[in-house]
Image: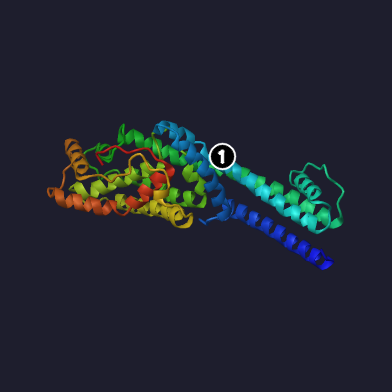
Amino acid sequence: MSDFLFGALRVVTALGGAMLVITTLSAAIRSFVLPRNEVVRLNVWVFMGIRVVFDLAAKLANSYERRDKIMAHYAPVALVALPVVWEALVSFGYTGMYWAVGEGSWLHCYQLSGSSLLTLGTIDDFSVVGGILTYSEATLGLLLLTLLLSYLPTIYQAFARRETTVALLELRAGTPPTAACLLGWLNHDGSVQNDDAQWAAWEQWFVEIEESHTSLPILSFFRSPQPGRSWVTAGGLILDAAALLFAAVDVPRPRQAETTFKAGCLALNRVYRFFNAKAGAEPSSLLPADNDEAPHRADFDEACQLLADKGLRLCEDRAAAWAQYQELRSRYQPALEFLSRIMMAPARQSAV
């Protein structure tokens, strides 16, 4: 190989290594520092590659409980894998740059890169340019680890707030939780319109879901401590209760309940669009949910009977109420079904 071609190869290798390092650093910053919901392709590839392995393992499980136990490890493993992949890519990028500036063979450059990145200090025979690269690599290695470690408390605080609402909702909606039972609990004082504080708390929960589950998308896959719970089914339960209230109960719509319904539809649909349109996942390509069918007319009639038994005044035109309920549910049903599939949410019972 001529000196010109060899020199050109060194330049291309240096530029390629620098680009790999810059791309990796950009992915880390956009993942945990940038305060907006931006898709990071590098992270998507890591998460999807690990998800394939977990999907294969989940397919071998013969019950939802075993699938849930397997998938509970997916998000933590994927999150821990991120800095490993980032540092591996940075190491490869710097290996190319060390070789380009003449630090020795590829093996020696790889050892130098690993020593610098992990701050081991086992390789010290480098040039001035190599020394600059070494210290910059050591700085980046600490930065990447610090980014993840500093944001772990943020992730788990958001998870804890989310799951507190999910657990409280189960206490109010019965076992198994249903929208009709939840409305019956809201009607504890004889008027379902008097519990604005509860609807306001759920509105705040939906706002936090929309923000946290798009800016930190791996948080969506952290499963509830109890296998029968899920933030997806909890969100669907609140929206089903609101839709049932608006369609079937013969009272003026509470203003706060309407606001909560809008916030819930917005939150679920934005998380749905984030994963569906940008991550490239389609519902049909993923494991099916245990039960993703929309409620039928018989389920709606059963829920109405339960509401009547709890003392709520219902609309006389049941057919019109059913049509209105279907229209309201269509605003979030596609998002709910899609998120139930990719999150492997537990099945909901009937009674709407």
Query: Viewed as shown, does residue 278 lie left or right of 8?
Result: left
- Residue 207 visible in image: yes
- Residue 224 visible in image: no
Q: Is residue 311 above or below residue 6?
A: above
Query: Viewed as shown, does residue 23 lie left or right of 66?
Result: right
| Residue 215 percent location from the top left of the image | 51, 52
| Residue 130 percent location from the top left of the image | 82, 54
User: Looking at the rendering, in which quadrant would you find the C terminus?
Assistant: top left
Foreground residue among 240 and 314: 240
* Residue, far bottom: 4
| Residue 238 percent location from the top left of the image | 33, 44
Query: Viewed as shown, does residue 92 lie left or right of 100?
Result: left
Residue 308 occupies which quadrant of the picture? Answer: top left
Foreground residue among 101 and 161: 101
Which element is circle 1 on? helix
Pointer 1 residue: 77
Q: Residue at x 38, y 36 (%)?
A: 168
Q: Is residue 271 above or below residue 348?
A: below
Foreground residue among 257 and 222: 222
| Residue 8 percent location from the top left of the image | 77, 66
Q: How is the image coloured?
A: rainbow
Q: Residues within 10 Å of mark 1 (few under 14, many from 20)?
A: few
Badge 1 amino acid: Val
Q: Residue at x 41, y 43 (%)?
A: 287
User: Looking at the rendering, in which quadrant would you find the N terminus?
Assistant: bottom right
Q: Residue at x 47, y 49 (%)?
A: 213
